[in-house]
Image (cartoon, rainbow, N blue to C red):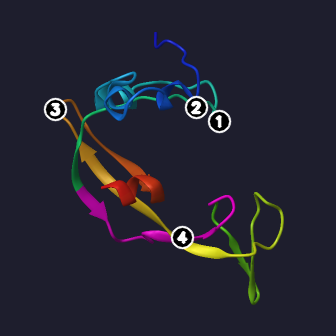
């Protein structure tokens, strides 16, 4: 059984400590069962990027306030999270990756903040 963790605990400590936080293999991560779709768990792994899926959009137009994807409505945008028309929007990375380690291969999505680090 996987131990429950505090949602913000993965952000504590140095970057090196964060990289080792709740470390699992890809096989272990992909075999975890969740009680609900909204359940959040945080794990780290060391994996290699095998490929970037370019068959789909690699960015989205996001609300500059909350970073969530906005919806185009006529000549303007609407942010469902902020529940209003955003003052500003910007393109944000959303890269679909195929990653692997020695235990498994899987897909994941890398968003803006992580994509800009690499």
- Per the model, the C-alpha gap separating discs 1 and 3 is 29 Å
Residue 29, how many percent across, how many down? 38, 28
Left or right position of 101 against 116: left
Residue behind mark 1:
38
- Do the residues under discs 3 and 2 have CB atoms within 8 angstroms? no
Question: Badge 4 is on which residue?
Answer: 60
Whichever of labels 3 and 2 marks the residue nearer the N terminus, that label is 2
Query: Measuring 75% from the left and 90% from the top, which residue is drawn there?
Result: 75
User: Which element is circle 1 on?
Assistant: loop
The magenta-colored residue range is 51-67
Looking at the rendered image, the disc whose residue lies closer to the viewer, 1 or 2, is 2
Q: Quadrant of residue 83?
A: bottom right
Graded by Cα atoms within 10 Å as few (under 14), some (14 to 19) or many (20 or more), the crowding at tag 3 reads few
**Circles 1 and 2: CB atoms closer than 8 Å:** yes
Label 3 and label 4: CA atoms lie apart by 32 Å
Q: Does the magenta stretch include residue 106?
A: no
* Residue pointed to by mark 3: 102
Which of the marked residues, 2 or 4, is nearer the chain's N terminus? Answer: 2
Q: Nearer the viewer, residue 115 or 4?
A: 115
Secondary structure of the residue carrying numbered label 4:
strand
- Taking depth in this image into account, of 13 and 102 the one nearest to the observer is 13
In the picture of the structure, the residue carrying the numbered disc 2 is 40
């Amino acid at each position: 059984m996987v131990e429950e963790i505090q949602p913000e605990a993965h952000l504590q400590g140095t970057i090196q400590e964060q990289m080792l936080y709740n470390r699992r293999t890809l096989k272990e991560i992909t075999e975890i069962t969740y009680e609900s779709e909204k359940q959040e768990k945080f794990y780290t792994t060391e994996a290699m990027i095998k490929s970037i899926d370019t068959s789909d959009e690699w960015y989205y137009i996001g609300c500059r306030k909350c970073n969530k994807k906005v919806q185009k409505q006529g000549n303007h945008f609407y942010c469902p999270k902020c529940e209003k028309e955003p003052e500003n929007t910007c393109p944000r990375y959303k890269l679909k990756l195929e990653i692997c380690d020695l235990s498994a291969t899987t897909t994941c999505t890398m968003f803006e903040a992580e994509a800009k680090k690499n």
